[in-house]
Amino acid sequence: MSSLQHTALIIVGHGSTVNPDSSAPTHLHADAIRRRGIFREVVCCFWKEEPNMREVYEMVDSDIIYIVPNFISEGYFCQQVLPRELRLDGPITQRDGKTIYYCDPVGIHPNMTRLLLQRADEVAPGVPRDRTSLVIVGHGTNLNENSRKVIETQVALIRDGGHGFAEVVDTYMEEAPFIADWAKLTTAPDVVVVPFFIADGLHSFQDIPVLLGMREEIGAALSESGVFHHNPHQLQGRLLYYSGAIGTAAHMADVILDQVHDFDAKHGGKAQTGKQKAEIIQALAAWLQGGRDQIGEIAIIVNPDGTFSLCHIADRGKDDLQVHHEAHDALFIARNDASGVFRPLHSAPTLNRGWRLDLATLDDLRLALDFLYPAALGMAHALEQNKLAAVPLRDVLGRQTGMYRFANTITDDQAHALIGKCCANENCLRRILWPLTATQQMANEAASKTQPNHAPNAIPLLCIEACTHIVSAARKIARESHEANQPKSAD
């Protein structure tokens, strides 16, 4: 894959505003691929976390970009949400001098069958397949038939492929056949259950264990008690082996690369040669040379030997700090606040203290800062070059679908109040660049957030469009306004 060394890979995940486990596999697979040196740049973006799908393009310099959805099926998100948010025209998009290749989601690749078989053998080592029922469980939805189709396909491939299981069954959380009926759907004495999800989260830690009968009710996440390490479970006269989500398998990184390879085979993408640029890292070097040694809550220290150190600005000069040495450690430094609460918004002024991150090269520094403040460097550089395009709030709310489609019904006054409250500096350190509409600027409480708010020696934190927190808050306001305007019952 040497022809990819001048290209970028963007892995798209769902993410979550409440559960860090949702994005963890996507980050881990990206790191595994990054270490192989196949691509010039490897980054992630998310629907519910940072960076979002509009910001992520500011993180890469490469002219050729491969996008691989780290999703299970060709469902609603891959067919509607991702193309809309990533501004894609189809499999191949030409925009702003870049060529963007949109690959198939990982979950539909044929090699997922191999991963399922490996996971089944790992969770029940030494258990003969001919006395084992393999149960693959999905979410189930009526929104898109492809969400179910991908699991049915895998079941058929394993069942008809001569892999030796006594039976192979597809089940779902929210449609028949239900995972709660696993004992009726299977007959073998040993049962292996593999969640066909990208990440371990509330479904695999809580919901499915309850449906299986492993616990009586939903409580604290079973991840805390090692639900995947207490196999087998004796239930209804059987031995049940419960696996982690298939998307957490280390070999998922290979499936991501398989989708890139298959895209090239189908569309001839690798025939093109990208231009090698290093604008972002050159800008970072220039900022440091010019005395910019801060970004958000981070102090950037250039050491005498040419290496770099990062720490919380309140910890500058302290010696009693926990020292880290890998750029990837920044991802975990940024994950939780001082009380251990997940930080889905990295620009919130809640960064933990007590650490120092030592980095050997400028490339390592750039990567670490992208983990701490996703896309911040690229957006600051683009703003200096007058190339940063902000999206008006009404445009963002207006393109929403599904449960968020009514978000744009909020009034202008409600919008200004919402931004003034949610985006206040005590909640987010970014400066808003977007107006209310193409012709109407922010006003009232929101107006102050559009002004420069960083120190002269700081790289600015910028916001080019309303984040998922704003969209969710607008939906809540719209719903409350609608309910308040409904006629009151005569009773």
Image (cartoon, grey):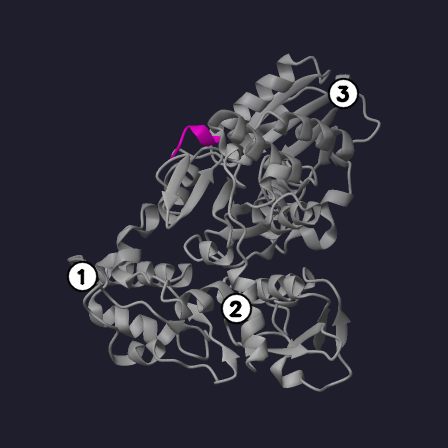
Q: Amino acid at mark 2?
A: Ala
Q: x, y percentage for residue 229?
A: 77, 44
Q: Amino acid at mark 3?
A: Arg
Question: Mark number for residue 61?
Answer: none
Q: x, y percentage for residue 475?
A: 32, 58
Q: As rendered, which of 293 and 25 lies closer to the eye?
A: 293
Indicate whether residue 146 is drawn in magenta. yes
Question: Mark number for residue 129?
Answer: 3
Q: Earlier in the sequence, mark 1 or mark 3?
A: 3
Give the residue displayed 64% in from the left and 53% down from the top.
Answer: 221
Query: Mark 1: which secondary structure?
Result: loop
Q: Quadrant of residue 171?
A: top right
Residue on which disc 1 sits? 485
Give the residue displayed 61% in from the left and 71% down from the top.
Answer: 337
Query: Mark 3: which secondary structure?
Result: helix
Q: Rounded to the nearest whole Å, what is the CA distance between mark 1 and mark 3?
A: 60 Å
Q: Nearer the viewer, mark 1 or mark 3?
A: 3
Give the residue displayed 31% in from the left and 47% down from the top.
Answer: 401
Q: Earlier in the sequence, mark 1 or mark 2?
A: 2
Quadrant showing the N terminus? top right
365 vs 410, left or right, is right
Q: Rounded to the nearest whole Å, what is the CA distance between mark 1 and mark 2?
A: 52 Å
CA neighbours of label 3 inside 10 A, class few (<14), some (14 to 19), many (20+): many
Q: x, y percentage for residue 431?
A: 40, 74
356 vs 17, left or right, is right
Q: Nearer the viewer, mark 2 or mark 3?
A: 2
The span shown in magenta is: 143-147
Query: Mark 2: which secondary structure?
Result: helix
Quadrant showing the C terminus? bottom left
86 vs 218, left or right, is left
Residue on which disc 2 sits? 283
